[in-house]
């Protein structure tokens, strides 16, 4: 059911990256009902987080250049990243080890998995070539002294549509039909048929494509009444327009809307029937619009740079924004308590108060154990920031640090 009333909840801010965040994405729901988020960053260190809370789980170490894109496989067991160091890498999300390095001859901007297969990976970038790597032809490294990352060259990949792309491939997305994938290059979307390795549909858009992603909640909560009839919807931001396609092959145009500003990113909530648009330079806001009439009804402020990527969690109860300012923000998209958001009476409180909890903990320590000086200093700084609820996430981590005396 669509909700037109803006939800006045302060977002959670996920710190950790030191440079712009060009891409974020979520996993599907696990059997336990949990999910994960992965972020690419120009600092070269993609990160895995708990999708519900934004808590850091681990950093994948190994790239030697900016990471432009990061995606999780359908079961979240592996992750793929695309980097300016001329490689794409595949990682074990449990151990953090690099399993395969896909060597290219130029910057890699895009990676993609099929909907239900982690053995195939599509890559693209500044070489202007779309390639498919079959990882089953290079067995996964086993545990032991010789368990090192395997390097796969482009000569072992299948090139699709040779010579067709005239600009860098910035995005690749696989449709529900595993034989069809879509590339975003320059201002053009192309639908490729993999068996024939040819283009079967092409669309020239309003300008340079800023984002191109599929959006849909987890299969178990999709309904025919959703936008797209329960299938994922392809959302594209280009120039001063946003576009949406639906259907099994994402070839049916559902809507396009002209904006008053240059757009950097777009995401669609297929259940609540709204879409969110991130503004391009020099703006820093994300604006929320009704699907039916395209009217604006909310604005998300808080980032200090353009919003390059927007992604919905698989349960549809929150969405994330990644920005030029190096942070990720999680925005609540449901009523009542959820995750770190708590409810106080009839109104939503943005967060619990781990700063207050930490203060009490440190008071208890005074007679028995003196807190480390660096923790005291950071704690005092956090206390001054209590008016800013986004600091609660930081304070929560500090509380655990103080408790361990590290």
Image: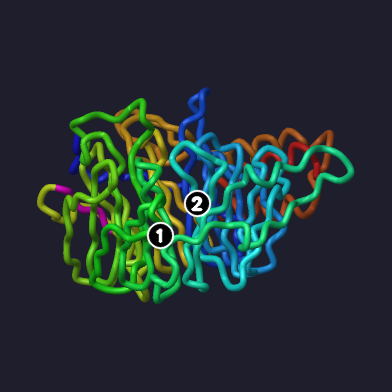
Which range is magenta? 286-291
CB atoms at circles 2 and 1 under 8 Å apart?
yes
- Which residue does the numbered mark 2 point to in the structure image? 13
Foreground of the two, 93 or 281: 93
Q: Residue at x 36, y 30 (%)?
A: 219
Quick one: which residue is furthest to the left in this view? Answer: 293
Q: Residue at x 25, y 29 (%)?
A: 223
Instruction: Determine whether 282 is above or below 215 in the image.
Output: below
* Percent x, y of residue 197: 40, 57
Residue 391 seen in render: no
> Residue 307 location, x and y as percent?
40, 63
Direction from residue 27 to residue 292 in the image, left or right? left
Residue denoted by label 1: 302
Counting from the top left corner in percent of width and height, residue 57 is at 64, 42
> Which corner quadrant of the image does residue 211 belong to?
bottom left
Q: Is residue 381 above or below residue 367?
A: below
Nearer-the-camera pick, 233 or 365: 233
């Amino acid at each position: 059911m669509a909700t037109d009333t803006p939800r006045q909840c302060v977002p959670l801010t996920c710190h950790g990256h030191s440079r712009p965040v060009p891409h974020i994405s979520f996993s599907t729901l696990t059997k336990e009902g949990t999910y994960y988020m992965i972020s690419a960053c120009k600092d070269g260190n993609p990160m895995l987080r708990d999708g519900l809370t934004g808590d850091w789980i681990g950093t994948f170490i190994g790239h030697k250049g900016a990471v432009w894109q990061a995606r999780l496989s359908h079961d979240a067991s592996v992750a793929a990243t695309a980097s300016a160091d001329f490689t794409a890498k595949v990682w074990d999300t449990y151990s953090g080890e690099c399993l395969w390095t896909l060597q290219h001859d130029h910057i890699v901007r895009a990676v993609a998995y099929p909907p239900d297969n982690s053995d195939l990976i599509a890559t693209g970038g500044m070489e202007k070539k779309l390639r498919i790597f079959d990882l089953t032809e290079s067995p996964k490294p086993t545990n032991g002294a010789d368990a090192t990352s395997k390097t796969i060259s482009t000569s072992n990949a299948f090139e699709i549509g040779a010579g067709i792309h005239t600009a860098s491939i910035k995005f690749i997305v696989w449709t529900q039909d595993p034989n069809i994938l879509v590339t975003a290059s320059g201002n053009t979307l192309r639908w490729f048929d993999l068996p024939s390795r040819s283009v079967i549909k092409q669309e020239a858009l309003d300008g340079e494509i800023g984002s191109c992603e599929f959006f849909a909640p987890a299969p178990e909560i999709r309904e025919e009444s959703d936008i797209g009839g329960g299938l994922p919807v392809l959302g594209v931001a280009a120039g001063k327009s946003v576009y949406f396609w639906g259907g099994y092959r994402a070839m049916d145009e559902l809507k396009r809307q002209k904006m008053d500003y240059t757009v950097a990113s777009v995401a669609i909530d297929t259940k609540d029937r709204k879409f969110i648009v991130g503004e391009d330079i020099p703006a820093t806001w994300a604006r929320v619009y009704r699907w039916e009439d395209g009217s604006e009804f909310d604005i998300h402020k808080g980032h200090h740079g353009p919003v390059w990527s927007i992604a919905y969690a698989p349960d549809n109860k929150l969405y994330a924004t990644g920005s030029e300012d190096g942070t990720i923000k999680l925005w609540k998209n449901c009523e009542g308590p959820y995750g770190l958001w708590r409810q106080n009476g009839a109104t939503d409180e943005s967060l619990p108060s781990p700063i207050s909890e930490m203060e009490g903990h440190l008071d208890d320590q005074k007679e028995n154990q003196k807190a480390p000086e660096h923790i005291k200093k950071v704690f005092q700084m956090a206390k001054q920031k209590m008016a800013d609820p986004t600091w609660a996430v930081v304070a929560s981590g500090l509380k655990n640090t103080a408790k361990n005396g590290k």
